[in-house]
Image (tube, rainbow, N blue to C red):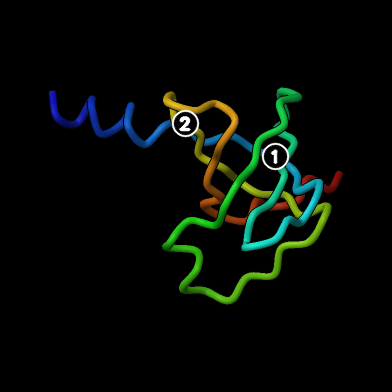
Amino acid sequence: MRKEEAQTEQGRQERGVVVEVLPRLMFRVRLDEGALVTASISPSLRRVIVRLIAGSEVLVTRTHRDPHRASIVQLAASKKP
C-alpha cells in the first residue's frame, strides 16, 4: 500500500516545452496536452549544470494537489524527424 501512495504522491511525468523563463528559477511550461503550468527545477536537477531557455523540451512531474504547479525532472530528447 505504501508503494501506491508514493506513486500517487510523486504525480505523473509529462512532456512539455519551456515557454517563458521567470525570476527565481521558475519557468512557464506548455505541456503536450495544451495545459500551461508554472514549474521549478527539481532538487536532483539542481545538482547538475543545466541551462533552460525558451523552447527547451523537458519532462515535468505534476502533483494531484495543484495541477497548475510542476517540477522539471529532466531535459527531454528533442523530437527531430
| Residue 11 against residue 23 in the figure, above or below | above
Residue type at mark 2 is Arg
| Residue 24 against residue 40 in the figure, above or below | below
Residue at disc 1, secondary structure: strand
Number of marks in picture: 2
Residue at disc 2, secondary structure: strand
The quarter of the picture where the C terminus appears is top right
Residue 15: horizontal and vertical position, in percent? 64, 38
- Return the residue found at the far front: 23
Residue linked to disc 2: 12
Name the residue: 58% across, 76% down: 49
How busy is the neighbourhood of tag 2: few (under 14 within 10 Å), some, or many (20 plus)?
some
Residue 8: horizontal and vertical position, in percent? 33, 26
Residue 43: horizontal and vertical position, in percent? 43, 61
Q: Nearer the viewer, residue 52 or 78?
A: 52
Residue linked to disc 1: 16
Residue 6: horizontal and vertical position, in percent? 25, 34
The quarter of the picture where the N terminus appears is top left
Residue type at mark 1 is Gly
